Image (cartoon, rainbow, N blue to C red):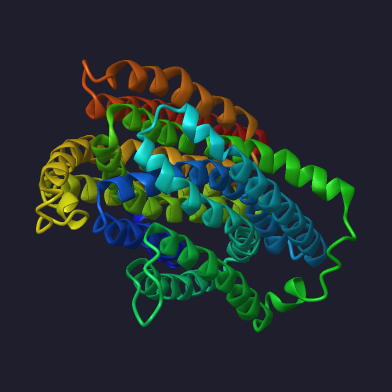
């Protein structure tokens, strides 16, 4: 098929994916700003935010992964003009997201003592625990927001969650500045101030997205008059069947990056701070691929509802191609500026911490070289995963992600990440191996399923 058959989809792909990218980049930008502001306090504070967020990443991955079950169900109902099925998918999905948000908050809150048994730097643990108390509670509004967001994405109304996220970002940055450094008469709260900013901004984010959707003709009947406790057991079972494997997929991937944080902590506070810098930067580029992944899920879900399988495959490949082009661009940026980007996070005018900051910079710059290489495999695996979710194929991909990250990636990270082997660089080589394995196996799965659908229809 000529290249033009794929590139002609780029404009619509971009219209659909760009708001999702910007919204997700917004979430990551909050973390970026948090890290830069907290990094000015010292490397122990930066490592503490990293350690605290490592618990949050695990919980968030479960909640966000689970909520993705709502999008293909809404997309399929929307393309078929079935409002009743769509509202049932949304209402039951929102109920499950709320319950899950509360459970995840309790899980993280009571898991805090684990930090003392993980051989992490003691000064880092002492700073991380009060930070985590507040950030853990923000899981409840975050997962509820995800329920609304995935519904909105399923209706192809991707820009409204972006608006809510951008508003939350602005509020978070202002609150961070005031509360971390004690401006405008407020006490200087350090990293706890960053936690307050995150908590308050997430509640505002949920309220504003609901307000936006309530005001739109296409969505207002869905988000008003919600009989929250009148539940459909069959729909709940369907969402659980789709959402649970999706949650596990995201958990397996996020957990290996979390393991990288903990393995870095075994090497000391400076390797852990360097890991956080490289992780934060690569997370920002990953959100572009995540935006295209959501677009894949929506467009594949729509084509599945219409039973246009040849079109489904062509559109999916157009998204994969677009993502690979972005990934190549990011890889070149990371490689070219690997010595400069980490300098954004540390204060070289701080004479007291100059030795620590110099070590952090040296480690982080090497990690960005690995991050440059895995841009392509990371983009491919998440975009193909989105397309498979659009097909409502979740069980085999869950197995693939487990094998890739935990039977291939983690053993390599653990072995090569020891101080006497390659240290932090070895940990990230394991991440590269896991992501590359996932990209190859998930693509083989998608290729097999779509060819089978086309042959079955013929």
Give the camera-side residue of 444 and 389: 389
Residue 375 vertical position relative to residue 344 in the rendered view, above or below: above
Give percent across and percent down for residue 71: 63, 55
Give percent across and percent down for residue 86: 76, 62
Residue 186 in which image quadrant: bottom left
> Total of numbered circles in the picture?
0
Give percent across and percent down for residue 330: 24, 50
Q: Residue at x 64, y 80 (%)?
A: 211
Apparent side of residue 39 relative to residue 169 in the rendered image (left or right): left
Give percent across and percent down for residue 227: 86, 67
Residue 134 vertical position relative to residue 122 in the rendered view, above or below: below
Apparent side of residue 296 relative to residue 93 in the rendered image (left or right): left
Apparent side of residue 265 relative to residue 404 in the rendered image (left or right): left
Q: Residue at x 49, y 52 (%)?
A: 130
**Residue 391 seen by the camera:** no
Residue 434 in which image quadrant: top left
Where does the N terminus fall, quadrant-wise?
Answer: top left
Q: Residue at x 42, y 40 (%)?
A: 125
Q: Residue at x 36, y 28 (%)?
A: 263
Give the camera-side residue of 12 and 115: 115
Residue 145 in which image quadrant: bottom right
**Residue 393 seen by the camera:** yes
Where does the C terminus fall, quadrant-wise?
Answer: top right
């Amino acid at each position: 098929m000529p290249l033009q058959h794929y590139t002609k989809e780029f404009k619509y792909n971009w219209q659909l994916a760009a708001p999702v990218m910007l919204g997700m980049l917004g979430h990551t930008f909050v973390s970026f700003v948090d890290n830069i502001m907290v990094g000015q306090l010292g490397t122990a504070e930066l490592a503490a935010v990293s350690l605290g967020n490592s618990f949050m990443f695990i919980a968030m991955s479960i909640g966000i992964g689970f909520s993705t079950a709502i999008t293909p169900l809404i997309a399929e109902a929307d393309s078929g003009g079935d409002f009743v099925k769509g509202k049932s998918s949304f209402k039951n999905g929102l109920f499950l997201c709320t319950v899950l948000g509360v459970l995840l908050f309790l899980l993280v809150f009571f898991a805090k003592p684990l930090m003392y048994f993980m051989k992490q730097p003691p000064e880092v643990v002492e700073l991380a625990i009060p930070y985590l108390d507040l950030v853990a509670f923000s899981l409840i509004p975050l997962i509820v927001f995800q329920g609304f967001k995935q519904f909105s994405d399923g209706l192809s109304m991707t820009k409204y969650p972006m608006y809510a996220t951008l508003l939350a970002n602005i509020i978070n940055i202002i609150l961070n500045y005031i509360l971390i450094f004690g401006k405008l008469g407020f006490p200087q709260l350090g990293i706890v101030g960053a936690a307050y900013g995150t908590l308050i901004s997430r509640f505002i984010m949920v309220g504003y997205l609901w307000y936006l959707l309530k005001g739109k003709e296409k969505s207002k009947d869905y988000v008003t008059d919600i009989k929250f406790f009148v539940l459909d057991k069959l729909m709940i079972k369907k969402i659980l069947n789709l959402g649970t494997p999706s949650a596990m997929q995201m958990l397996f991937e996020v957990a290996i990056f979390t393991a990288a944080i903990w393995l870095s902590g075994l090497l000391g506070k400076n390797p852990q701070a360097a890991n956080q810098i490289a992780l934060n930067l690569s997370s920002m580029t990953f959100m572009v691929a995540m935006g295209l992944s959501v677009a894949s899920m929506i467009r594949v879900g729509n084509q599945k509802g219409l039973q246009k399988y040849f079109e489904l495959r062509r559109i999916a490949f157009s998204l994969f191609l677009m993502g690979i082009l972005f990934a190549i661009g990011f890889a070149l940026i990371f490689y070219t500026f690997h010595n400069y980007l980490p300098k954004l996070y540390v204060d070289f005018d701080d004479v007291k911490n100059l030795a620590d900051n110099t070590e952090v910079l040296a480690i982080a710059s090497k990690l960005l070289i690995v991050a440059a290489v895995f841009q392509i495999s990371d983009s491919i695996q998440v975009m193909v995963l989105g397309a498979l979710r659009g097909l409502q194929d979740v069980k085999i991909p869950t197995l693939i992600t487990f094998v890739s990250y935990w039977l291939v990636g983690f053993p390599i990270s653990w072995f090569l990440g020891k101080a006497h082997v390659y240290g932090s660089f070895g940990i990230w080589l394991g991440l590269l191996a896991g992501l590359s394995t996932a990209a190859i196996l998930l693509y083989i799965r998608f290729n097999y399923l779509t060819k089978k659908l086309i042959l079955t229809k013929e």
